[in-house]
Image (cartoon, rainbow, N blue to C red):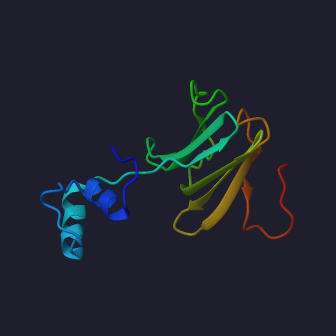
Amino acid sequence: MNEYFSASAIIIMALGITAAAASLPLQLTEVAASITTTLTPVLLVPIAISDDNIYLAWPTNKTGNYEVMFRASTDGGATFTDKINLSNSTDAESQDIQIAADNDNVIVSWWERNATSNEPVVTISTDNGTTFAPIMKLAANGTIGMAE
């Protein structure tokens, strides 16, 4: 079986259109109709990998407020740590998560949004995601740092 698919093949598979029913090129109206009737929204989990370390960060809304959750693996994904709530925001929605890693360093950034604010923030771990520094507000004037 071919492990590589063209973008149109991936769209067809994602939309649940069978090969017999699909005629390429797909009409935009056919794609739009299928999207609105057959797809369930999917939140992707940002992933960062450095050596055998795998880091995951994702949004959750279990408390009625979007938060940034994090897990780490230092054994290539065989096991993962307990989840950590990185944002702990009660007055804002934590959204648009990005994650990067290099050696033992993990950087997680996201936006804190509410009715009056739209602010980028970041937190950094220097120990493979075991602990994280306090959140830094990137839009603040002046010098910012990991110490509060």
Residue 137's place in the image compared with 79, above or below, is below
Farthest residue, direction front? 1
75 or 57, nearer to the observer:
75
130 or 115, nearer to the observer:
130
Farthest residue, direction top? 79
119 or 49, nearer to the observer:
49
12 or 33, nearer to the observer:
12
When asked about the image quadrant of residue 109, the answer is: bottom right
When asked about the image quadrant of residue 83, the answer is: top right
Would residue 101 be seen by someone viewing this image from the given angle?
Answer: yes
Query: Residue 138 vs residue 73: left or right?
Result: right
Would residue 92 be seen by someone viewing this image from the given angle?
Answer: no
Tally of numbered tags: 0
* Residue 92 percent coordinates (x, y): 55, 57
* Residue 95 percent coordinates (x, y): 53, 57
> Which residue is located at x 37 percent, y 61 percent?
6
> Which residue is located at x 57 percent, y 24 percent?
79
> Which residue is located at x 72 percent, y 32 percent?
130
Farthest residue, direction left? 21
Residue 130's place in the image compared with 103, above or below, is above
* Residue 10 percent coordinates (x, y): 33, 57
Residue 48's place in the image compared with 129, above or below, is below
- Quadrant containing the N terminus is top left
* Residue 101 percent coordinates (x, y): 70, 46
Query: Residue 28 vs residue 88: left or right?
Result: left
